[in-house]
């Protein structure tokens, strides 16, 4: 027998209609928020960025990442140079990219992932995951640092980092985790083959850009839980009977679940 509230069908319908009113109000507020997001002022970029890509040229500018379209959406995928594999949270988010990247491309929007790991590591992990969306390396570039998703060890340990539009305390506040430790951050870090300090010098986020009048403008960036909206599994869980129902890090890379097909062997990933 369930301990959850039960009802007759008529009682359920009355409660559902009350919830529907709240859902409709949320939808209208979400639409208004999207308009406010689109009205943000743009910042013209004066700095040149170069990326390593799998194109024939090998190198690409930010302009070339647009692939001829007027809008570019960059997912800042957590995969640092010292990682052995991509962040499992970012990997779960990126599992949805293959499908809708095509639709975005046919609506004048290019979706591109960018990480600081060398291109060879990204390509090997991309093959392992079976992904087809474009993924560039910003290794050796200031791109990740300028858009506040990568940080130096000095920033982390001596000054604290500016992430998600606020200043974090220096790393020592994560007591006991610097060499391994325990807890969710240490668990995820171990899954990338790193320690918490190294792992958290990379952060997730999304930034958008537009080309207009021969110039490139930065339009929007969001970080941390700001990427919940593109984490497709959570949109489903928020409508599941038990919701997110989380007691810890339950997700894995899609080839690491017990019922997943055996992954193909790739040198970069343990």
Image: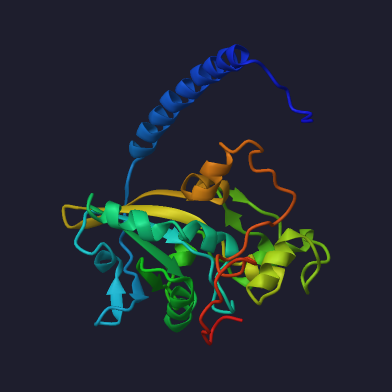
Looking at the rendered image, the quarter that the C terminus falls into is bottom right
Q: Which residue is drawn at the image coordinates 37% and 61% (left, top)? A: 98
Q: In this view, does 147 lie above or below 21?
A: below
Locate residue 173, reporting x and y percent.
78, 58
Q: Which residue is drawn at the image coordinates 57% and 81% (left, top)? A: 269
Q: How many labels does the image show?
A: 0
Locate residue 13, reporting x and y percent.
55, 15
Is 250 placed left or right of 109 in the picture?
Answer: right
Q: Which residue is drawn at the image coordinates 59% and 76% (left, top)? A: 83
Residue 153 sits in which quadrant?
bottom right
Q: Nearer the viewer, residue 106 or 70?
A: 106
Is 58 placed left or right of 123 in the picture?
Answer: left
Looking at the rendered image, the quarter that the N terminus falls into is top right
Is 71 placed left or right of 98 in the picture?
Answer: left
* Residue projecting furthest to the left: 213
Locate residue 257, reporting x and y percent.
62, 65
Rendering colour mode: rainbow
Q: Is residue 250 above or below residue 42?
A: below
Is 73 placed left or right of 93 in the picture?
Answer: left
- Residue 94 in sight from this viewpoint: yes
- Residue 197 in sight from this viewpoint: no
* Residue projecting furthest to the bottom: 267
Residue 49 sits in which quadrant?
bottom left
Locate residue 80, reporting x and y percent.
55, 73
Residue 194 sits in which quadrant?
bottom right
Q: Which of 223 and 102 is in front in this view?
A: 102
Q: Nearer the viewer, residue 156 or 270?
A: 270
């Amino acid at each position: 027998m369930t301990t959850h509230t039960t009802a007759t069908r008529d009682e359920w319908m009355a409660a559902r209609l009350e919830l529907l009113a709240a859902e409709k109000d949320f939808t209208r507020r979400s639409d208004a928020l999207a308009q406010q997001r689109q009205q943000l002022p743009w910042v013209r970029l004066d700095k040149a960025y170069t990326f390593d890509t799998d194109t024939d040229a090998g190198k690409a500018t930010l302009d070339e990442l647009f692939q001829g379209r007027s809008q570019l959406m960059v997912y800042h995928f957590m995969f640092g140079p010292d990682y052995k594999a991509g962040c499992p949270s970012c990997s779960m988010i990126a599992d949805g990219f293959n499908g809708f990247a095509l639709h975005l491309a046919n609506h004048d929007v290019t979706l591109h992932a960018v990480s600081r790991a060398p291109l060879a590591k990204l390509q090997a992990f991309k093959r392992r995951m079976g992904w087809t969306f474009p993924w560039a390396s910003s290794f050796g570039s200031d791109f990740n640092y300028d858009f506040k998703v990568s940080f130096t060890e000095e920033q982390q340990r001596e000054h604290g980092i500016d992430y998600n539009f606020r200043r974090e305390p220096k790393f020592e506040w994560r007591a006991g985790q610097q060499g391994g430790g325990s807890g969710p951050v240490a668990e995820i870090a171990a899954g990338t083959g790193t320690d918490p300090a190294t792992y958290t010098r990379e952060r997730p986020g999304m930034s958008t850009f537009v080309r207009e009048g021969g110039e490139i403008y930065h339009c929007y960036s969001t970080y941390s839980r700001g990427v919940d909206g593109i984490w497709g599994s959570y949109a489903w869980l928020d409508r599941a009977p038990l919701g997110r129902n989380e007691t810890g890090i339950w997700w894995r890379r899609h080839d690491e679940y017990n019922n997943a097909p055996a992954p193909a062997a790739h040198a970069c990933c343990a």
